[in-house]
Amino acid sequence: MKKLLAPTNAELDILHVLWDRGAATVREVHEQLSQTKTARYTTTLKQMQVMTDKGLVKRDDSERSHVYQAAITREHVQRQTARHILHRVFQGSSKALLMEALGVKPASTKELAELKQLLDDHEKGRKR
């Protein structure tokens, strides 16, 4: 199985649209992206063709307008990115990564409760 390359920032923008929508045509993706970014339709089309070649998206060409879907999950990309940042930037220290993340954007009360529960579950799993 070939290793997927990490998506570029532009590819991530497209993947976010597809993860939120489930499936979409190039036009639908382009319209969504153009609400916050300036790009030409042909640029979005070319980017999605490249993403198909890289295995990041799947294209259904059974209809006149091709429909695209993400070929990788949001969770996969988040895990891959977190692993890369953890090792390259924080030298493998989960504590340093988490402390920095909380310093950049404080967690809500609900998020803190979920984090505490995850830590408790993680600790219980290690004691077994």
Image (tube, grey):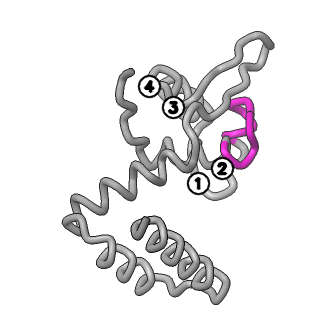
Q: CA distance from mark 4 to mark 3?
A: 6 Å
Q: Is residue 64 left or right of residue 107?
A: right
The picture places residue 85, in percent across and down from the top left corner, at 31, 60
Count neighbours of disc 1 (C-alpha within 10 A) and say few if under 14, some if 14 to 19, many if 20 or more.
Answer: few
Say what secondary structure mark 1 lies in: loop
**Residue 25 picture location, percent across and down:** 73, 30
What main secondary structure does the magenta stretch of the protein show? helix
As measured in the structure, the alpha-carbon distance from the residue carrying label 4 to the one carrying label 1 is 23 Å
- Residue beneath the point at 56% across and 84% down: 107
Q: Nearer the viewer, mark 4 or mark 2?
A: 4
In the picture, measured across the screen, residue 119 lies left or right of residue 68, that is left
Residue tagged 1: 37
- The quadrant of the rendering that contains the C terminus is bottom left
Q: Disc 2 and disc 1: Cα gap in Å?
A: 5 Å
- The stretch of residues the image draws in magenta is 19-30
The residue to which callout 3 is attached is: 56
Residue under label 4, please give it. Answer: 54
Q: Is residue 35 left or right of residue 100?
A: right
**How many C-alpha atoms fall within 10 Å of the one at disc 2: few (<14), some, or many (≥20)?**
some
C-alpha gap between disc 2 and disc 3: 21 Å
Question: Could you say whether the residue bearing mark 4 is in a helix, strand or loop?
Answer: helix
Q: Amino acid at mark 2?
A: Ser
Distance in Å between CA atoms under marks 4 and 2 = 23 Å
Residue 123 locus on image (x, y percent): 44, 73
Amino acid identity at mark 1? Lys
Residue drawn at (41%, 44%), measured in percent from left and top? Answer: 8
- Secondary structure type for disc 2: loop
Q: Is residue 91 above or below residue 65?
A: below
The mark found on residue 111 in the picture is none
Tell me the mark number nearer the camera, choosing from 1 and 3. 3
